[in-house]
Image (cartoon, rainbow, N blue to C red):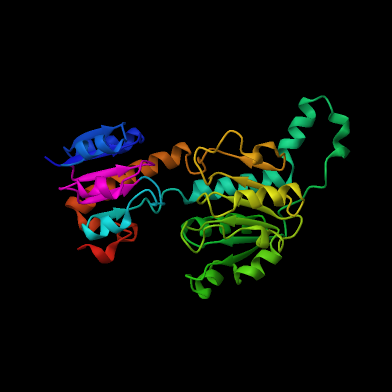
Amino acid sequence: MIKIAIMGSIHNDGLVFLKNQGYDILEIVDFSEEKLKKNLKDVDGIVLRTATLSKEVLQNCKNLKIVSRHGVGYDNVDLNTINIQKIALAITGSSNAVSVAEYVMAMFLNLCRLIKQSDQLVRDGKFKEKASLPDFYELYNKNILILGFGRIGKALAKRCLGFESKVLVYDPFVDKKIIEENYCSAVNFEEGIKKADFISLHLPINKETKNIINKDIFQLMKKNCIIVNAARGGIINEEDLHWALTNNKIYGAAIDVYEQEPPNNNNPLFNLNNIVFSPHNAALTLECRKRMAVESCENIFNYLENKSYLKKENIVNKRYIDL
């Protein structure tokens, strides 16, 4: 019998799908390396949330054929070992774009309209002191820079255009024609940073993108600029972000992801009022959790038994495996 491990809780719709295939389902809650070596040694597939699959654990998986991420990032998987062992690595590429795009729009509006501060003013009995709030802004006719133009970037662009904003895109891996077909303007990195009133990050974390938003870059931004990171922690240097926010180099920020997760309780950013936080849940609407659960499980079934229905664009390491 095919054996599938579920590492982390997923919506029941995904579990039902796998059980209906007659698979043996192993739900894992202890992610210590020794336990994983023992429990995963004979599984055929893994549905993975945020736990880590290290080289040592993967090398002990003698029967593993596919790891399916419940999401789009895969920095918690040792990619080199996956490739060497010819284990497929899948993502839920079509599940979370809408949820994350809506989150970014919510943060743009929260920050530019001072929703948090306005709410507190009323709660504090200072209704008549609304003139004490700083200037706040519209999204209409503003320059919105999207860094990274994959599925989420495209979904966000569509929503920004609905606000009659001007959408700028920086993504050196996407053809200019594709950007323009989506009614956006391709820009280079520095040009986009200087023009932007709003910035949203949709980049992977790697050597090139680590701390790509730093003090030097903040100094190029407009003072009314708002930046949102719902991609990966570490793309924005948090110490430099604190500097930019406390010195009024930018207007505001929202972050869903952190250099260290969970962040330390004494993170100095928590003392600021011009930033909004969320606990890495930008994609976790109920609708999206259902989609990710089902898609991550479908990836496994289709790879193991029904490759004609497999979404090949979901397989990250196609060049290393036989499709």
Give the tally of numbered discs: 0
Q: Pick whichever, 73 or 291, lies toward us.
A: 73
Name which residue lies at 39% across and 54% down. Answer: 93
Residue 45 among those drawn in magenta:
yes
- Residue 189 percent coordinates (x, y): 60, 68
Q: Which quadrant holds residue 185?
A: bottom right
Q: Along the horizontal axis of the image, is 111 left or right of 299?
A: right
Quadrant of the image containing the N terminus: top left
Above or below, 101 relative to 22: below
- Residue 302 percent coordinates (x, y): 23, 51
Q: Magenta stretch: give its range.
A: 43-69
Residue 310 visible in rendering: no
The residue lying furthest to the left in this view is: 1
Residue 177 among those drawn in magenta:
no
Residue 279 visible in rendering: yes
Above or below, 281 relative to 228: above
Q: Pick whichever, 168 or 54, lies toward us.
A: 54
Q: Pick whichever, 154 or 91, lies toward us.
A: 91
Name which residue lies at 51% across and 51% down. Answer: 231
Name which residue lies at 50% across and 58% down. Answer: 203
- Residue 15 percent coordinates (x, y): 28, 35
